[in-house]
Amino acid sequence: MELRSIALATGLFLNVIVIPAWAQPPETQHPGNVVINIAGHKVPVVAGGLYDRYRSNPPLSVIAAEAPSIDLSWFKGLDKKKVDMGFESYSPNFFYQNSRVTAIYTADLDRLRELIPAEMQNHIQPIQIWPGRGVVALTAFSYNYCDNDSYHEVALAIATNKPGRSNLGPISLISQSMSDDLWGYVVKLPVNTEIARVRGVVGYNLPKWLTGINRRESDSTVTYEIIDSETGKLDITLETKKLEDLSDKVNMVTSNFTNADKNGQLQYGYAVSRLLSHASNSDADSVKLTLNGGSLSKYIESLKLGKMMKYEYVPDFQSALYAPAPLASMSASD
């Protein structure tokens, strides 16, 4: 199979899994915050912000009044439902205006297999694109305006087969990309607000922790800096180029993830993303990843990253993140 075909399929993987404000440090208690209770956790949120006022269910009329430049037509066709996610909330969670950058690499297949929990290995496995090599995606998100106010997060995810489907290597990857139905296992997901951490861990069973994530933008680059939560020092720098020739053709992608809840029950969740402005290439000069020896850097080093297969620059997208459901329910209805 041609490398170009594999790279194209890989580039479409996880737009991203998962499944977006400007740089800000981890939240602390200050006069601009109020403290609320989520599943027994004391969580500071922006006083008078969307979450403080509406708990993930703001009327679209409020969004339209506060951010009249945002196109809300897609969200008008989506119904929110009250759900129990370990706390009362609404699904899907809306992300109205966001941006991201994604770098996709080959990685050591044996190491990726080690990272899939034993109880999940009968359902998902890392996709092998050629002998000994799998695929990982490193994505930095900026959620500029969403139901949870605003925050940054960085996702590291392994490309996998769809549960219940055969793992056919690059054929599986191409099949997923052609159907815009992508599957992955999220291994790391630092965030820079406590509400994003608590909701992600309790509600979605995702490996989130709170740390500093700074975003800088110049005329030609977008740079994310991830702080090591253990030392307070700079751990990772992801410097990416702004690409020209942006496409404004709307692209709809579903990004799915699998994991287990606190009781060990296997679950899956997904996000539907509406890409409004996007471009990509396979030029290694578009991304500079600097690892500075912190805990996340060492974890990434253990993956033995190879060549960057694709870079995606998405300065404008919208998303709807759905509450997780038992994996058995997906298999039964598939």
Image: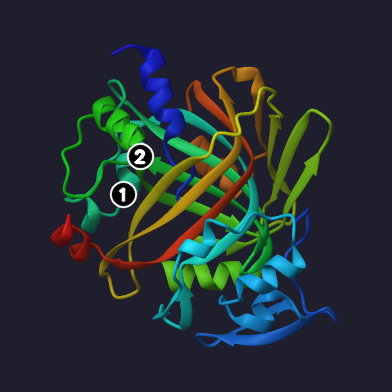
State the CA–CA distance, disc 1 to disc 2.
7 Å
> In screen coordinates, is 19 left or right of 132?
right
Residue 322 place in picture, x, y as percent:
42, 64
Residue 58 percent location from the top left of the image = 61, 76
Q: Position of residue 125 (x, y in %)?
A: 25, 42
Residue 43 in view, yes or no: no
* Quadrant in which the C terminus is drawn: bottom left
Residue 132 appears in the rendering = yes
What type is the residue that disc 1 sits on? Answer: Ile
Q: Residue at x 60, y 59 (%)?
A: 72
Query: Where is 77 relative to 141, above or below?
Result: below
Compared to residue 203, the image places residue 169 above or below, namely above
* 123 to the left or right of 288: left
Quadrant of the rendered image containing residue 68: bottom right
Q: Which residue is mark 2?
A: 112
SS assignment at label 1: loop
